[in-house]
Amino acid sequence: MILSANEENILLAAEIIKKGGIVAFPTETVYGLGANALNKDAVIKIFEVKQRPYFDPLIVHIDNISWLEKLTLNYKNEIVEKLINIFWPGPLTIVFKKSEIVPYITTGGLETVAIRMPKNNIALKLIKYSGVPISAPSANKFGYISPTNASMVYEQLGNEVDIILDGGRTEIGIESTIVYVENNDVYVLRLGAISIEEIESVIGNSVEISEKVKSPGQFKFHYAPYTKVVIFDNIEDVISCINDYKSAVVITDKKESPDLPDNVIYDYFSESGDLREIAKNLFEKLYYYDKMGIDVIFVKSIKEEGIGRAIMDRLKKASRRGALKL
Ligand code: TXA
Ligand code: MG
């Protein structure tokens, strides 16, 4: 059931969380599928509904930093403090050593727990009214596109969730950046809405993208529509093969408006190439064209700097279903 995220319905959703139910809700990145992170039976429901493997850990969402003392063993660290001061609430997830109260089902059996404080008033109120930290993966079926509006959640999870709180379109559109801090070094485990450059400017040091610490949910194939996604650099390459397909869409920036055959749909992620706008529209557009049932979605590659790196990470993972090389 989709309910508008007014005060009354957030309270109702909080009651469901308290009783061990599951609720889909908006964050600033994508919609999450939430349960009481400390209640094993509630967390199991998330894995069941998402059809997610149990070794893939969940992010725990908090509304208040006092939770760090209860949920973690090592939150007192100068770098961690800097990151929290600047980026929380916001789309940065930090991996800590977990305390005893965090069940292994939430952490995929790991001794660590990933935590973030979302920058979305509906999410923050839901956590506050529930009185517990809320573990929430993106509210999609495992491997599919993350939802950035309530109907994308409904079409994937329907009545398998108790309530879907509708807070409109999410502001950012791609997931949080996940980091691990060891001594004074920061390792990025998943590229996301906070860019490496932004983190580096805050800690005054370089940041590594690292597999040194495993993030069990980082699959090569993910965020994928059923339709083939093909990333291209030069529009000429697309034009030379486009007649091989009955139907296709070509997505670039509005300013490029390429000259394409009449049977090809043309669309854009942004008016001007602005990376924030591209991120915001990315999953919605892929989802829309996937439902349209066309043969191929051609997408122009994006410069891998700032959050362009995270956008390309999502696109590359999306393109691995039925891979086709240009
Ligand atoms: O923006 C977001 O992060 C969204 C919203 C809902 O908050 N959530 C999200 O969750 O993207 P999910 O489950 O789709 O991705 C979480 C990923 C996992 O796949 C896993 O790779 C990583 O977080 N993760 C969770 N706990 C971890 C841990 N203890 N150590 C390393 N990686 C962890
Ligand atoms: Mg996800």
Image (cartoon, helix red, strand yellow):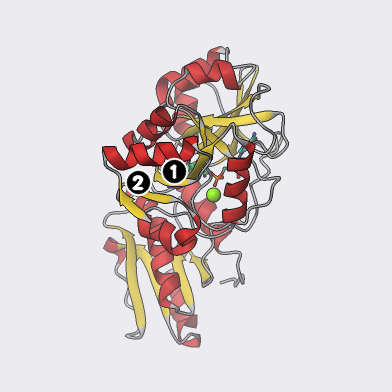
The numbered disc on residue 307 is 1
Q: Tell me the CA gap for discs 2 and 1.
A: 8 Å
* Ligand 1 within 8 Å of the CB at mark 1: no
Please say if 253 is above or below 95. Answer: below
Rendering coords of residue 288 (x, y %):
39, 68
Occupied quadrant, residue 96: top right
Q: Amino acid at mark 1?
A: Ile
Residue for point 27% across, 62% down:
255
Residue for point 50% across, 86% down:
244
Residue for point 45% across, 51% down:
162
Please say if 262 is above or below 259. Answer: below
Is residue 304 visible in the rendered structure shown here?
Answer: no
Occupied quadrant, residue 172: top left
Regarding mark 2 in the picture, which secondary structure is present there?
helix
Is residue 65 visible in the rendered structure shown here?
Answer: yes
Q: Residues within 10 Å of mark 2 (few under 14, many from 20)?
A: some
Rendering coords of residue 305 (x, y %):
46, 43
- Most foreground residue, 42 or 222: 42
Mark 2 and mark 1 lie on one chain; the one further toward the N terminus is 2
- Most foreground residue, 6 or 89: 6
- Most foreground residue, 272 or 26: 26
The numbered disc on residue 224 is none
Occupied quadrant, residue 143: bottom right
Please say if 184 is above or below 257. Answer: above
Rendering coords of residue 53 (x, y %):
68, 51
Labels 2 & 1 near each other (Cβ < 8 A): yes
Residue that label 2 marks: 276
Regarding mark 1 in the picture, which secondary structure is present there?
loop
